[in-house]
Amino acid sequence: MEYRRLGKTGLQLSVLSYGSWVTFHHQVGDNMGDKLMGVAYDNGINFFDNAEAYEGGKSEEVMGRILKNKNWDRTTYCVSSKAFFGMYGKDNKPTQRGLSRKHLTEACNMALKRMQMEYLDLFYCHRPDPEVGMEEIVRTMNTLIAQGKILYWGTSEWSAAAILEAHHVAKELGLEGPAMEQPQYNLFERQKMEKDYLPVFKEVGIGTTIWSPLASGLLTGKYNDGVPEGSRLSIEKYGWLKEAALQEERVEKVRNLKKVADELNTTLSTLSIAWTICNKNVSTTILGATKVEQLTENLKALELYPQLTGAVMKEIDGIMGSKPARRSIK
């Protein structure tokens, strides 16, 4: 396993990590989750990602039980949660969502309880909240740090301007700004990581824990001929994912990417994950495999990414129709 520092912090995260979005509780129960997290940990993964909104807190409960049963040394791994959406969907009361001091504090406390932990390594503002002043957000997150409930705070899907504002406010107050951002990043979603966030990387050196490297499974190639039963995009409540992913133009690009994968004697999923960690601004790429064989295949990205030469990257960009401002780590 390779480890990278989370931005300018002293924390080293495995370049591949494991998350529970969509999968835990709904697709993955305690037994399979135990196997998957065991394989991840045994292969050097030291970061496990979660959030209050994942299955209304049930995802955190599953992960918490697994970690308690594993009895791994707590100093060897990192765990996260996020707050914004609340746990109850449309039934959330006004005080049960957003980034107010009340919700952030209560969401953190409830996450700790569900995961049976004394502290969270990483805690995110899951989305921006224009109804809450930046000073309140920054002060609340720093209070949680001072209380020992979280070690680092960050953002998810914030704009570059909002992240820089948070750092400016934190500097004025003599407090800590966000240490990390969690954006979507894959061969189809590149704008933030490769263009928008460049000033953020340069000015404040923020780390990134990217999600959906396989574009909700589209980049595995399994949707090239329709939606298989039991797959993520077949789940009714995630219909919005299906609508976003299964555009014919995108599916055709995936078919063409398969040729590149074949040339490298690898799979589409391994190629797509390896592509993300070629970006020097990616601290860690979060995997979401639901089967041991999928996770084992995903981990092969570590061996593959040094093989993604300039010529290969150019071929991939040609297929995707992109001329990015990305920087290769090589």
Image: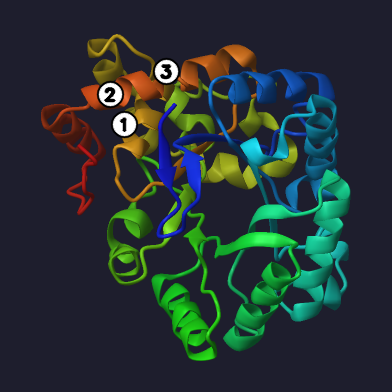
Q: Is residue 114 above or below residue 164?
A: above
Classify residue 310 as left or right of residue 135: left
- Residue located 54% across and 74% down the image: 176
Determine whether the residue tagged by mark 3 lies in a helix, strand or loop: loop
Snapshot colouring: rainbow
Q: Which residue ends up furthest to the left in the rendered image?
A: 311
Closer to the N terminus: mark 3 or mark 1?
Answer: 1
Q: Residues within 10 Å of mark 2 (few under 14, many from 20)?
A: few
- Residue located 48% across and 54% down the image: 183
Badge nearest the viewer, 3 or 1: 3
- Residue located 76% across and 79% down the image: 101
Give residue 14's position: percent from left, percent from top. 49, 36
Q: CA distance from mark 1 to mark 2?
A: 5 Å
Q: Residues within 10 Å of mark 1 (few under 14, many from 20)?
A: some
| Amino acid marked by disc 2 | Asn
Give residue 32's position: percent from left, percent from top. 76, 19
* Residue 29 visible in rendering: no
- Residue located 24% across and 19% down the image: 260
| Amino acid marked by disc 1 | Lys
The image quadrant that residue 263 belongs to is top left
Q: Residues within 10 Å of mark 3 (few under 14, many from 20)?
A: some
Closer to the N terminus: mark 2 or mark 3?
Answer: 2
Q: Is residue 72 above or below residue 225?
A: below
What residue is shown with label 3? 300
Q: Which residue ends up furthest to the top in the rendered image?
A: 265
Q: Are marks 1 and 2 in contact (CB under 8 Å)?
A: yes
| Amino acid marked by disc 3 | Lys
Q: CA distance from mark 3 to mark 1?
A: 22 Å
Give me the disc on residue 256: 2
What residue is shown with label 1? 253
Give residue 33's position: percent from left, percent from top. 74, 25
